Amino acid sequence: MQINTISIDNSVSPAKIEFSEQFNVAVPFIDRHLEEGRGDKVVIKVHGGGDVTYATLAEHVNRAGNALLNLGVKPGDRVLMMVKDAPDFYYVYWGAIKAGILPVPLNTLLRAKDYAYMIENSEAAGVIYSPEFSEEVEPSLETATHKPPTVLKTEGPGKTFAMHMAAADTTLEPARVSPEDDAFWLYSSGSTGNPKGVVHAHKDMVITSQRYAVETLGMTEKDINFSAAKLFFAYGLGNAMTFPLWVGGSAILFAGPPSPADMHEIIETHRPTIYYGVPTLYAAQLKTMGNTNVDLSSIRIFISAGEALPPDLLRRWIAKTGAEILDGIGTTEILHIFLSNRPGEVKPGASGRTVPGYDAKIVDDDGNEVPDGETGSLMIKGESLLKLYWRNPEKTAESLHDGWMYTGDTYYRDEDGFLFCCGRSDDMLKVGGIWCSPVEIEAKLVEHPKVLEAAVVGRADDDELIKPEAFVVLNDAGDESDALKKELLEHCKAGLARYKYPRWFNFLDDLPKTATGKIQRFRLRSD
Ligand code: 3UK
């Protein structure tokens, strides 16, 4: 019997992908490259030093998997990762998967309160974190009512996961699992309530890599991938890890925040062939390029996702660089991009057409498909959809219908089959490509002693990119001042993830509400 293998039949379109009954995804993504003679090939280029070959990767993945098992973590257990973009991320993630343990990469920009919730909600057996994030991770471990038995920093002074890896065996039998078994989780935010654990199966990374990276982008082992979006996002996870590992290519990793200057330096130094950004960053890069010449000639494909790429920004980018950007939409639940523009076939303002293997339909409130040109709710069918939301059967039932998933986005389709995004069907915002819940920012504002009530909506900035705007009702109307706006700004910056603070503040006498007292955010939007 074949185990841990995939067969791809290219004679049909889309290609037919079949998995062996026993299938651990770490085998084709990690071990296969040694069999295919890539042992000495560099898979990870770390900006600032330290290349990793496929052979070193495979050895460290085995060590990491064994280290987790030696520490008492069991197959099926969850290990939360607050790990920066570095080879450690690959080791912990794939070591866990190979051992049948579920890695859960978390957004490293979050705060202690967010982590405490995820530790409790996942009942994690382990937490592995980069020392850079101690300030938020350590207090979360103190306050969480669930205490993960294994807590280790990746590196640094004291006991580290690296020490456990060094002491562990270099060979590891892949856990016997099936293509449909749980492989890893990601957390996704919602407009109300807490983040939800999105459970993905072993087969899902094969699907996204084959459907998007190979069949849509034509990625090969020659490609050098550089993602401004970090590995902990589903977007970055595909760009900078699963896609290169699928095709036998390589990725450049950079642990710092994605400033335009650093992006340009890395591009010129390491000469990537595929670059993945978000609209906010492309806008910032354009501003920086106004004064300098940047050599982007190594890049054959520029990609944008996370939020819609404004047509004017795309036009300005093409005018300046001569290169197009491929906008595509993905979600954590579908794991990667399922609608995309193609090289040479870009429509400004569109998310593109369906990626092979995915079907899209746009439906009205009764679930009936609407004619082309009419807006409705975007639903997607495909092979990489989440299995379920962890311990949230209501949300699972609400989102999944006969293999179709509600994305929560409003779209229309034109006569050429291009799909255009018209915004969210809920109040959620994407700020710099990252989820931002108005409810969370409102709750933070209301914590301030002078604030009675608050409402937060999205407002387009000069680049047509959405940022949070706050409408605040004060306890004492007489307190309205610019000094108080500044105080509220500092209050938000101190208590929320960095990207979530409101960029504009307004004072109102009262908020627009429904008869049942629900805030009508749409009445505050300026569009
Ligand atoms: C919005 C877009 C318009 C949209 C993601 C690439 O962003 C990703 O996943 P998330 O779960 O957010 C999903 C939501 O973000 N969105 C993303 N891309 C676009 N809206 N145009 C776009 N190009 O509201 C969607 O529902 O954070 C992006 C790959 C994998 C991903 N998970």
Image: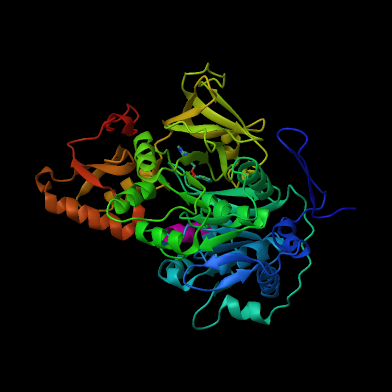
> Residue 504's image quarter?
top left
Whether residue 196 is in magenta: the answer is no
At 50% from the left edge and 73% from the top edge, which residue is drawn?
A: 49
Q: Is residue 157 visible?
A: yes
Q: Quadrant of residue 384?
A: top right
Residue at the farthest top position: 371
Q: How is the image coloured?
A: rainbow
Measured as percent of width and height from the top left, residue 131 is found at 47, 73
Residues in magenta, as a range: 113-118
Front-most of 230 and 509? Answer: 230
Please say if 77 is above or below 479: below
- Compare residues 63 and 292 and report the one nearer the observer: 292
Q: Position of residue 235 (x, y in %)?
A: 52, 49
Return the residue nearer the eye: 433 or 112.
433
Farthest left residue?
A: 478
Please, is residue 201 above or below residue 412 in the view? below
Question: Residue 287: where, in percent of width, then height?
Answer: 29, 50
Give x and y (percent) for residue 74: 70, 65
Which residue is pictured at 19% across the width and 41% down the height?
Answer: 506
Horizontal side, residue 507 vs residue 441: left or right: left
The residue that appears at 80% across and 58% down in the rendered structure is 176
Chief secondary structure of the magenta portion? helix
Instruction: Answer with left or right where residue 464 lies relative to residue 142.
Output: left
